[in-house]
Image: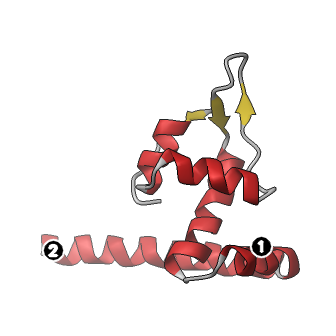
Amino acid sequence: MKHKLGDKLYYSMGEVAKAFDVNPSLIRFWEKEFEEIQPKKNAKGNRKFTQEDLKAIDLIYHLVKERGFTLEGAKTHLREDKSETLSKFELIRKLKAIKSELISIKNKL
């Protein structure tokens, strides 16, 4: 995620799209393509994303946008190596957070 979201139970489509710096249409497309994204819909049909949905979108974003996987490649990768992919992804995110913290400390010195 490029932008931080607060701690809420549900996030709107606009908040999610802004957090990942993508168009809402891309999120809707990924929702159709990947079964990992299952937002709740209210009576009007507005999508409400949970923390689990955000984690799935973050992983898909990482595979497709950052690592350059095709959609089919990302689907296959998630099906075959889901636990391994998740653990590597979590590790990468933690290391990036540590790196950004160290850079901010360096800039303050």
Q: Position of residue 80 (x, y in %)?
A: 87, 81
Q: Hey, which residue is sitting farthest top in the picture?
A: 43
Q: Is the C-beta separation of discs 2 and 1 under 8 Å?
A: no
x 24%, y 72%: residue: 105
Q: Label 1 sits on what residue type?
A: Lys
Closer to us: 68 or 25: 25
Q: Is the residue 21 above or below the residue 87 in the image?
A: above
Q: Position of residue 91 (x, y in %)?
A: 60, 78
Q: Is residue 6 visible?
A: no
Task: State the CA–CA distance, disc 2 to disc 1.
Answer: 40 Å
Dot 2: within a 10 Å radius of its alpha carbon, few (fewer than 14), some, or many (20 or more) residues?
Answer: few
x 64%, y 67%: residue: 59
Compared across the picture, whether 26 is left or right of 52 comes to left
Q: Position of residue 86 (x, y in %)?
A: 72, 73
Q: Is the residue 93 above or below the residue 54 in the image?
A: below
Tag 1, which secondary structure? helix
Question: Which circle marks residue 58 in the picture?
Answer: none
Tag 2, which secondary structure? helix
Compared across the picture, whether 95 is left or right of 88 comes to left
- Circle 2 residue: 107
Q: Is the residue 68 above or below the residue 43 in the image?
A: below
- Circle 1 residue: 75
